[in-house]
Image: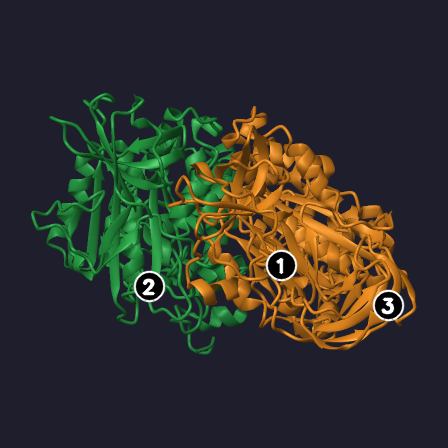
Amino acid sequence: MTSATTTTTATPGAVLTRVTGTLAEARPLRDAGLYELVRVGAHGLLGEIIRFTGDAAVLQIYEDTTGLALGAPVVATGAPLTVALGPGLLGAILDGVGRPLRELAAASGDFVAPGAAAPTLDPARRWRFEPRAAVGDQVAAGDLLGVVEEQPGFEHRVLVPPGAGGEVVELRGGDVTVDEPVGRLGDGTVVRLAQRWPLRQPRPVAERLPADRPLVTGQRVFDLLFPLAEGGTIAVPGGFGTGKTVIEHGLARHAAADVVVFVGCGERGNEMAEVVQEFPRLVDPRSGRPVMERTVLIVNTSNMPVVAREASVYLGVSIAEYYRDMGYRVAVMVDSLSRWAEALRDIAARLQEMPGEEGYPTHLASRLGQLYERAGRARVHGTPARTGAVSLVCAVSPPGGDFAEPVTQASLRVAGGLWALDPALAQKRQFPAVDWATSYSLYVDATASWLTERAGVPWAELRARVLGLLQRDAELREIAGLLGHEALQDRDRATIEVARMVREHLLGQSAFDPNDASSSVEKTGCMAQLAVATLDAAEAALDAGATIDELELVAVRRAFAALRTGPGDELPARAAAVEAAIAALHRRPAGGAP
Amino acid sequence: MIAVRHHRGARALAGALLFLDDARGAAMGEVVELTQPGQPARRGQVIDAGDGVTVIQILEDPQGLSPARVTITLTGAVAEAPVGRDLLGRTLTGVGAPLDGLPAPIGEALRPVWGAPMNPARRHPPGDVIETGVSAIDGLNTLVRGQKLPVFSGAGLPALELAAQIVEHARAGGGEPFAVVFAAIGITARETRLFVERFRDSPAMARSVLYLNETRDPTIEQLLTPRYALAQAEFLAFEAGMHVLVVMADVAHYCETLRQVAAARDEVPGRRGYPGYMYTDLATLFERAGVLQGRAGSLTQLPILTMPDDDITHPIPDLTGYITEGQVVLSRELHAQGVFPPIDVLPSLSRLMNAGIGAGKTAREHRRWADQLYASYARGREARMMATIVGEAGLSDPDRRALGFATRFERELVGQGATRRTIADTIAAGWRLLESLPRDDLERLDDDTWARRPGAAAGEGA
């Protein structure tokens, strides 16, 4: 964004009459529009009009206001906060208002200086545009006009922008920049590779469709127990240290999406540095290309201006919708939505709005609902007919880890699933620290048949067995905690032992082990089936008269752990080793034992 | 920025806030000087500039100020601190005035104390260890250059003693230049003495700068002290190429002051009266830690904060934990048993540990070693809790063994006393503990790692 070209309806003589933190006031400034972008002061700090009172406009400033003085000039730009959408977004690292951070560093050094500017899309870079429509064709919004290879093997589809259409009057291929015209439509629309879109406005679709297949996350606990659907939404609340960020990063790396938009909203700089360094090196196994090539990173760390945090989430969703309109499956990760909500609270407090719960503005829930609703699977406009999806996974940082707070609760009203993270599990180094008793997914039924077909195991049944085992285990451990281990029968002890294996190795997954960081659907299904088979074999042996001490559960667990950390191509061999250990579970088979 | 302007008299004065009419050209963050006959000179800062009313936050004790008689000088500058290598070895007030009888430091440069955010795309991911000499940190919650790792303490727990020990013993490794910047924020005279006297004769003093804001100093200065310290640390790290460890104590005092100022401004209070922007404000301190691409130094932070009522869900530790890369938690129970340092490793965490350890850095098997120690200790602690209900006899054999392990772990590995342990010593001590358990109890260790442990029997592996 930060268009350098649009300084049109300047109000002559508008100056700053107040500055306090992120909020400012300028007058006389009546003829600009609500949510219009302004440039403030000698450095041209970016701001937005959020209210008019008398002849004054109230501005929220997207940059650090230290040193901004009364009487500084304020210029309205005539346009709302928009983002340039076009080729070059994939692989980019943008700040909350869409400025490319690497280019900013080239201009202003290692620290971000207020007023620094750079266009979102490289204005000098040339792209090979290949027309897919012909002069004389009748086209409408969403129709394919041509393509650009944005990244190796990734087709960026140049579409008729929303609201435009008519006869193709001109269209030519060639090497062009994002701003050069490549054609013209009958309604006067000039076709370029890039278009501008106001961040806060959802991009239209033809028809919203229900979820029908999972977005495979590569995390067993999610794919098996609490699946995410393509176009689905999940809230991931958890206190600090419960691994929200590791989960979000894991999804960005491994989720089976065409495009990933990662919004680091008010979080840590070092974490983003890790992503920036790692993603260009990490290979997406499905495309064989670096994951950075399918990723857009939006980074507004916690010490960067708070108002830009508010914009960063809309920026991310707008980019996601743009790729959805091309027919792609896009996954958006927001880390963390609480920091976005805090930005709303900060702005509302400075406007002296009546606070709602915990100081958050009363419009928090509706704004949050509107944001979640921008996700979804849809038939998009245009021909050829296609569907696209925007999935949204939002980390939430509840104060004190208490879910009874406004951001978590407002999220749960609209999200299609909850991955609840539990500090007690994190403290036991059980990662992902997902509390299976409180987590849920509304996409279980919609995704079961696809998963069953893909993995070749009865997914819904295995899911029910594993959840049942975990529930029984929790009850038994409570009893053992009260009455001692001796109070348990052999059958119960077997349940506890198998459940331990399930918790540690089936649901536990190490983000740092290259073979374990992502689990294929086949591996997840295979492991779930073997875990259930272990329980069945142990119970059968006990029923046949064996005692718990005669069962070689440690051997099974070792083989199971080896399956978990083994390379993908050894999956059948390692699974066979587990099966062999299950078959040899009881050394001295009593009559009738398996 | 605009030139110096003088105003005679203010509209109102409320605590540390001065309200000024018609302060033309006032800038956000502008430094203000306040003079009044018969009164010491004071400084302030513009926190709300307006054509109608401008609000100035006074940085010193406002007692005796009169709105009718005060002269307000808007200096046209934002707060800047002298920074440089010549400040090493110095003891200064919380805002950089000399406390050691020497002349005021000149510095190599003047830097705005508020700093600017690092461009995230220019950061280099932290990946090199700082050896603190403390086993519970180096072994299990490794501190990495560029990290911010707070110590969560409780009233009466020896957090400052631990910090002092780390400051004395810490090394960047590889003989690289290392410096310490200490920011005392509202700590008592007794605590200051503990720190300063320990240093005065220590070789560590020559590589340190102390910024001391004591309880008796103006409260509001507490908002500036960590920023003076960080401006200096940034210079040493990113311009002088040193590895800088910033120790800030006590962040809880800083937060109290933030709340006090917010209340004076009639702001809408957030949780427990702390302002809603406390997260963002703390982030402007903590996020100044890091490493930059192509620059030799690093800035590491070890903030210390006292958890009110030992409550980790209190807004101060809670918001801190959301910003920092882990936490080191002190335990009252261990302290009562005479364990020093009383670090409870279970709720402690270093998020950047994995980047700093492993082959070529600490030890190849460090991760699995740490995982196994954690697992065995966690099991032991659970068993200890169970034993209080069902008695030790009610425990299963592995649980009973884990219980014994937990006790030895606390006494031998964590409770090292005042000695300095190298990382190699720490790892060796951990293996000795693990070897006291049967191999079958060590499920986090694969056979390969087990065979490669130092001192493994010949034939088991190298």
| Residue A230, percent from left and from top | 78, 54
Looking at the rendered structure, the kind of residue marked 2 is Phe
- Colour of chain A in the image: orange
| Cα–Cα gap, marks 1 and 2 | 32 Å
Quarter of the rendering containing residue B256: top left
Task: Report which residue position mark 2 lands on.
Answer: B238
Judging from the image, what secondary structure is the residue with disc 2 in? helix
Q: Chain of mark 3?
A: A
Q: Is residue A67 visible?
A: yes
B12, B249: nearer the viewer: B12
Q: Position of residue A226 (x, y in %)?
A: 73, 48
Q: Position of residue A412 (x, y in %)?
A: 69, 37
Amino acid type indicated by mark 1: Gly
Q: How many dots with numbers?
A: 3
* Badge 2: residue crowd in 10 Å (few <14, some 14–19, many ≥20): many
Residue at which label 3 appears: A169
User: Disc number at residue A250?
Assistant: 1
Q: Earlier in the sequence, mark 3 or mark 1?
A: 3
Q: Secondary structure at mark 1?
A: helix
Residue B398, above or below A15: below
